[in-house]
Amino acid sequence: MKRLLNAKTFTGFKRAGLAWLETVIVAVLSIYIWTQSDSLAHTSTEHNFFWPLFGPLLISLRYGFAKGFTCSLFTTAGLATVMNITGYIEYYPLSLAIGTIMVAMIAGEFQDYWHNINRRHQLDHQYMSQKLESFTQNYHLLKVSHDQLEQRTAGQTVSLRSSIHALHKLASQHAEHRIEHLGQPFLNLLAEIGGIEVAGIYKITDDKIDSMAYAVLGDRHQLVKDDPMLQDMLHSKHLLSPAKLKADQIHKSRYQLCIPLLDTHGTLQAAIVAESAKFFMLTPANVALLSLVANHAADLLSNQIVTPILQPHQNDLFMSYLKRASYNKRHYGADSSVVVCIDSDGTHKHALDNAIGYRRGADVYWSCRTRNNQPALAVLLPLTSVYDAQLYINRLQELLNAQIGDEQHAIDIIGPLSMSQDKAEIRTLMDELGAYDESLVDTSNPDV
């Protein structure tokens, strides 16, 4: 707090109104000090320091040339007015007035030059910080997802996004009892990521785990309902593993992993319990990725969520996806991006609808309208950095150019916006699209 006050004392107010008010007040004080000083007495023989100089000098150092020059002119002109009213205008100290103006101008030029240099250094530092953060995020995503994790299979490279997309296709083919058809593919995908060797997937009904396994991996799997780790997972609805235990905690469970499949609505659809997993693969990064994939899998098991292509009235569901992405960033460090397309003249809605056909993997599309009834398309790109989201925008622009040619400029593409760095812009856009929800920024709730 003290440091903030010191900075404001030197740099001045940011609001223009307060800055000009301060300029006027300081000028009035300088005039008063000048009128009370001995420098105006023509009979005075003492040579004291010219204290009124400090007013314009202070304004120049705080706000630069413009306000400093204005303050000095106001001070000298005000003094001339006062001396004219009192009948002492012939004793007006012209040399002191000119000197005051010159000092204020020089100090103001110095402040402007110093401010520009500082601003340039701040921008350079901000740019380097952004580059460093982007590099760190890309390195993290490269380490925990995509092809490197999938290359542990028998010579076959399948990307994580492609695997999720395949699960979406499989889920869309079954309207009911999806866990019976998706259980084994889920286990296989999580086994590739976390090195799971023995595990089973179980349906959750009213927060109670069923006894029957819908899919099993390995030969020695067994369900123990009163297992402490399993009970903790059902209560907290968070992924649990020995890798997340503190140094002074003892692992008393039969299982190495308890993975909840929690959908976007916060409903526990199923759970995966694993007795055996390759311990060297249970790194914090891989555990985080397991939780992310389990969240997507839970959406596919829900009867209400089949494919993430949302209609205009499903704004609440889109906000739920945004909350999930914000939670994943805070707890797992996996950023997501948002892109919004707005048809400004309202004649190219068909182009936006055609773009939905190029949806990738777990991307969430929401066809909506702005408050001005302009057609719009909001796209959430989970597990996607700003760099990768920009590549998506480039492909989208090529698609629009192929469909509507030069008229593609009528479609405003806003983004890419990072869920971690551009929350204010995302909130503004959601408000414009009629989907604003204050709970999106409620970081005090760990379950949001």
Image (cartoon, grey):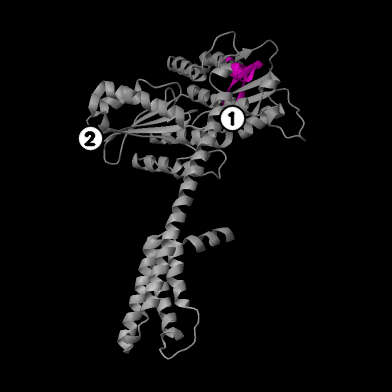
Which circle's residue, 1 or 2, is located before the other in the chain? 1
Indicate the secondary structure of the residue bearing disc 1: loop
Above-or-below relation of 104 to 349? below
What is the quadrant of residue 72 in the picture? bottom left
**343 on left or right of 282:** left
**349 on left or right of 223:** left
| Residue pointed to by mark 2 | 345
Residue occupying the point 39% across, 65% down: 105
Rendered-image quadrant of the N terminus: bottom right
Image x and y of residue 176, in percent: 46, 18
Is residue 275 in view? yes
Tags 1 and 2 touching, CB below 8 Å: no
Q: Looking at the picture, tell me which residue is in the foreground, 108 or 349.
A: 108
Residue 192 in the magenta stretch? The answer is yes
Q: Which callout, 1 or 2, points to the residue nearer the camera?
A: 2
Above-or-below relation of 355 to 418? above
**Label at residue 207:** 1
Label 2: few (<14), some (14–19) or many (≥20) C-alpha neighbours in 10 Å: few
Main SS category, magenta section: strand
Amino acid at circle 1 = Asp
Amino acid at circle 2 = Asp
Q: Which stretch appears magenta?
A: 188-212
